[in-house]
Image (cartoon, helix red, strand yellow):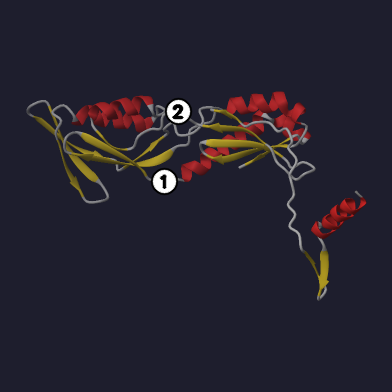
Amino acid sequence: MDITRDVITKIEEMAAPKTYEINGETYSNGCLSRIDPVYDSPSVLNVSSLESIVKLVTKEHKSINQTIFVHVDDYESVSVFTTYNERFERFDLYRSRFDAPRPGFGWKDYENAMIAFRSQFIPNVGVNYLLDILSRITDENSVSSNDNGMTQTVEARSGISLKTKEKINPRVKLRPYRTFLEVEQPESEFLVRLKEGGQIGLFEADGGMWKLEAKSNIRAYFEEKLAALIESGNVIVMA
């Protein structure tokens, strides 16, 4: 029995990892890997409005007991997460994404354009102008145009014998629903084009600057609604 115990002890000693000093560097003949402990963490909650984020942060910040960051990712998404804990880990808490139907741009026929202008844009001078143009170029579903690249003159036939010439403004300012409904929709310029068949084309012409304005509006919304928590240092809003 003693011999067996001695053999086992010897095998254990031989199998144990050893370190060696070679030219001032430390080497090991064994390979060790760290097993990370498992900690309870909240699951990410997905919502679709800014108001929901405000309610969640206001209600749950005490139980979270960490600084909360509200980050405006872009014009249609917001993420909320904690600062790092003693293990240098952050927890993702909430995400919100704008999920309303996006306005469709490009070429549209009379019916689709009329529906879009009345339902996907906030009423303003630009929308009224487009609706007026539609009402005067589609009586016979016929449009001819003279276009020099800067301005476009459209010949629209109303009725059978009346023919009028209309000079079309090449740009209009519109406010389509493109970001969260709790904030002001950014206004931007659109190119207006017309072609035969009574079709009207609408194309974005501001280079995407509206997206920066939308992010700024979202940040301002959180700064107002979470002002008390921001002042106390419990919440930090970023864009």
Comparing 50 with 117, the one in front is 50
The type of residue carrying mark 2 is Ala
Within 10 Å of disc 2 (Cα), the crowding (few <14, some 14-19, many 20+) is: few
Q: Which residue is mark 2?
A: 100
Comparing 204 with 76, the one in front is 76
> Quarter-wise, where is residue 204 in the image?
top left
Indicate the secondary structure of the residue bearing disc 1: loop
Q: Earlier in the sequence, mark 2 or mark 1?
A: 2
Q: Quadrant of the C terminus?
A: top right
Indicate the secondary structure of the residue bearing disc 2: loop
Q: Position of residue 98 (x, y in %)?
A: 50, 31
Comparing 162 with 30, the one in front is 30
Task: Check the image and report above or below for 230 versus 26.
Answer: above
> Quarter-wise, where is residue 109 in the image?
top left
Residue lying at 31% horizontally and 25% vertically, measured from the top left = 115
In the displayed structure, does residue 5 sit left or right of residue 73?
A: right
Within 10 Å of disc 1 (Cα), the crowding (few <14, some 14-19, many 20+) is: few
Q: Which residue is mark 1?
A: 206
Mark pair 2, 1: CA separation: 22 Å
Residue lying at 45% horizontally and 37% vertically, measured from the top left = 187
The type of residue carrying mark 1 is Asp
In the displayed structure, does residue 199 sit left or right of residue 70?
A: left
